[in-house]
Amino acid sequence: MPTITGIGYSTRTDSFAAGNECAAKAMEQIGQSAISIVIVFCSGKYNPEQFLAGVRSNTGNAPLIGGAAFGVFTNFDLSYEAYEAVATVIASDSIQFQTFSQPDLNKDEYTAGVALSQKINDVANKNPKGLLVFYDTAKSTNPPMLNFATPLFAAIEEKIDPAICCAGAGLMGDLQLTSCFQFLDDKVLQQNVLALLISGDCMFYNNIMHGCMPASSYKTITRAEGPVIFEIDNRPALDVIDELFGDEHKVAWNTFPLFVTLGLNKGDKYGDFKEQDYANRVCLAVDAEQKALIMFEPDLQAGDEVQLMHRSINLDYLYTGIADLKEKAFGKKRLLYFYINCGGRAKPFAGGELEDVTEIQKIIGHETPFMGFYSGVEVAKIRNHLQALDWTGVLCLLTEA
């Protein structure tokens, strides 16, 4: 049996009805074929238990993975910050899908990563090709505190075969980080890290879509503790950022810090700009009293040289990234494009009128199934090392071998 992919979408406001509708639409596209995997994401506005029950009314006991999303999209649809859901079903005799989970992410991200990796290594099918990892972006605290991707994926990188193409995402149901949950089979989970291992007669690729370019010279972080940057070039961090933005910037970034992005060049410092060499960090909040930046991850340290990044209004980089994926998959049947996109890149929050997902829909067209969701953090490899990313899209492609 050839591999078949079906995708369904719903904006119903009733939780059970939304789960039922998106799953039913996906099932229509695979007919009577046995389901190998169900992948579902839905808005944090839904009741997750009722939504999952709606999905299960159509998918039975097939393996299932997914969770909360700030927004979702398909080849034809795009919605965020409302009621929206997407379900993908794949039926295949030649590709195997295995799901894994590890609790207590909020207690120690690195330890959770080690334990998850051990579970994967113990029972992984032969010939693994791809690994997708999902975790709650925030802990269940008030106010929300972040689960950091950096130690989690450091553990995964240490333990998992580097030949496996890996991508990951921090799940969140809203930008306030108040709604984080995950789906695994018939369960709704919190503070877990989930993994989907893809093996068999297939290939799995991904590519990073930053859409940012340097807008300043290199600036040195001179004081940092965890995710907080206190000083840049031996001056208060906020003073340096204000100076870099200048008097003419229109966005009051100190009241909306997501507009501040710092880039760390992992490649040639003075070579030609290469988007794929940059790890970008978005500012989550500011500490006005200490004139400090509070970042999404704790990995920027004293001594790191960073640049203020400018978010491009030219979406040509999307064409380049997708062309690169198509080149890698030349001659192979494309089964699914899967896009993990930063929630801050949605048009209302990106500081522009362009929507990168809309452009990707145009480029990919309708021949290959396409789905994805808006995330809190994105993860992919930069120069052969797994790297937590911000204000980034990670586009994955599953093909036949």
Image (cartoon, rainbow, N blue to C red):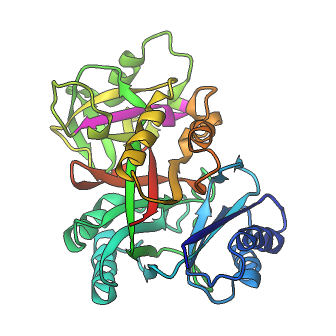
* Quadrant location of the C terminus in the rendered image: bottom left
Would you say residue 338 is visible in this rendering? yes
* Quadrant location of the N terminus in the rendered image: bottom right
x and y, in percent, of residue 312 in the image: 47, 25
x and y, in percent, of residue 391 in the image: 45, 41
Would you say residue 144 is visible in this rendering? no
Q: Residue at the spot x=61%, y=52% of the render?
A: 367
Left or right: 233 as drawn, with respect to 171: left
Q: Residue at the spot x=50%, y=82% of the render?
A: 93
Residue 401 inside the magenta-drawn segment: no
Question: Does 149 appear above or below 393?
Answer: below
x and y, in percent, of residue 299 in the image: 27, 50
Q: Residue at the spot x=34%, y=69% of the render?
A: 129
Question: Does 254 appear above or below 155?
Answer: above
272 and 367: which one is in front? 367
Residue 262 inside the magenta-drawn segment: yes
286 and 357: which one is in front? 357
Q: Give the range drawn in magenta.
A: 255-265
Residue 104 quadrant = bottom left
x and y, in percent, of residue 260 in the image: 44, 32
178 and 63: which one is in front? 63
